[in-house]
Image: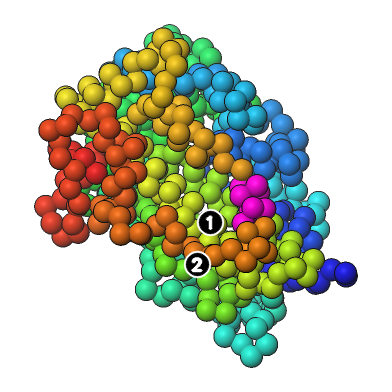
Amino acid sequence: MSERRIEVGIIGGGIGGLAAAIAISQAGARVTVLEAASEIAEIGAGIQMTPNVSRLLIKWGVDKIIGDDLVRHEEMYLRKKDGTVVGHSAPDRIERELGFPWWVVHRHHLLTGLLKTVERNRCNVTIDSQVTDVQHKTSDGKVRVKTHKGSTYVFDLVIGADGLSSVVRKTLFPDVSPKGLTNNSSYRATIPYSEVRKVPELLSIVSKPNMDVWMGPNGYVISYPISNGEIFNLVFSHHRPYQMLGAEEVDFDDMRKEYADYDPRVRKIIDMIDPSTIKRWPLVQTGPLDSWSSPSKNCVLMGDSAHSMVNHMAQGAATSMEDGAFLAVCLRECVLGNMSVPDAVNVYEAGRMPKSRMKQQVSFLNGAIWTLPEGPLADARDQAMASELGNKPILRSPNLYIDPVTVLEVYGYDVEGHAEEAVREFKRGGRLDKREHITQGREMDELTSVERWRADRTLNWFLPKEVDWRPVKPGANQIRTGHSQQSKL
């Protein structure tokens, strides 16, 4: 049977869009990427490539392009805000058991590696092409896309990989917009390791390429090496008393005040940051949505345009990359003539919507664990992690970077294997239900959409029994993660 010509348009040339372009072009479809910016570039600094997506970088050969700028951290330490170590994980053990590395990398190096791989796969990447109109309700089932320059493109499938301000999402679901559900925000900073090593008090945390997390009641600090170990990358997560709508300029003294009672080493690091580089960035979530696609299934969302999430499990970009890899397996069947494009989109939604929702929930819960109030709740967390410090076997842990169930569910996930099984199930006539594992009458937190059973498994099991779980109702006197009080979720 001859292969079908499938034209796919990807709106957005960020990490998720380029990863999708690689996977879908390798599946045999013809791919065009339309990027609004005048160059393919990535803001920000460090990003984690956990084993669930490092496996994709290896398969696509991106790791060979990035080379030594993919950094393996040796140890990961969870600390109280005063610096006391209370939890520990060893990435090399996770790599041995899952078969793939846990890398940290500068976003620029990752994007550069993806772009070079896209070019090797002969995808058409067009910059300075801001999409202004997406016509998906057509008589022939094709999607017509117009850019601000007046260019028109025709595709069998359009994929919205255009992030938080997605034009494609606004076309499909004009009433949907990302929201800061918990008033969580962050500062991001980088410092040359050569400068940090000049400070004797900091040698204890930079003598090896480790990852460190300082946990506090209103936020946390995470640090790790990037750029071949030459750059010290930091994220300062914290909560505001109001909901942010976008990035904010800040008074650097405000940042100092946020962490004034932290480990003296953290305060010393803050003093080394260039104040002109600091902004406050909101952490927002999109959805969960009831659908990611147009009624005719010729236009579909992926990545942040569909399911942006807080960053507490390092899964935002990873989940976007998984989306593209999963959809590529489905579209390969379209190229081979075994499946229609609408069928491929249905299989994609049924497989990926529950998975992305799970990650949204676990990410929120990890942020809750890292920002428990000092006292009985934080003490219970720290006590439950004590076994890790002696390298004793554990059945479960509040440290989700080593908790066996979470590690297998998130970091041990094989997205292409999942997609292959989903395609086989479809061919067998199996039921497709993108809502499966999402509602089913479960009790959930109305503010965050975290389901009771997941909160029980991930968070509530180690908290004192006298702390009652209850839904948080929007508009009520909410008790939010990171504030002076904390309810079970």
Please check the rendered image and state whether residue 329 is part of the magenta-colored stretch, yes or no: no
Q: Is residue 340 above or below residue 70?
A: below
SS at circle 1? helix
Q: Which residue is mark 2?
A: 292
Say left or right for 209 vs 56: left
Q: Position of residue 26 (x, y in %)?
A: 77, 55
Residue at x 61%, y 87% (from the top left corner):
138
Q: Three-letter amino acid code at disc 2?
A: Trp
Q: Which residue is mark 1?
A: 352
Q: Position of residue 382 (x, y in %)?
A: 29, 21
Q: Is any atom of residue 215 visible in this view?
A: yes
Tags 2 and 1 touching, CB below 8 Å: yes
Say left or right for 197 vs 331: left
Q: Three-letter amino acid code at disc 1?
A: Arg
Say left or right for 96 vs 284: right
Front residue of 37 and 226: 226
Give me the C-alpha separation between circle 2 and circle 1: 10 Å
Q: Which residues are magenta?
A: 415-423
Answer with the quarter of the image where residue 349 lies: bottom right
Q: Is any atom of residue 189 visible in this view?
A: no
Q: Residues within 10 Å of mark 2 (few under 14, many from 20)?
A: many
Magenta region, main secondary structure: helix
SS at circle 2? loop
Q: Is residue 374 above or below residue 292?
A: above
Residue at x 63%, y 59% (from the top left corner):
425
Among the two numbered marks 2 and 1 on one chain, the one whose residue lies closer to the N terminus: 2
Residue at x 73%, y 41% (from the top left corner):
59
Front residue of 148 and 66: 66
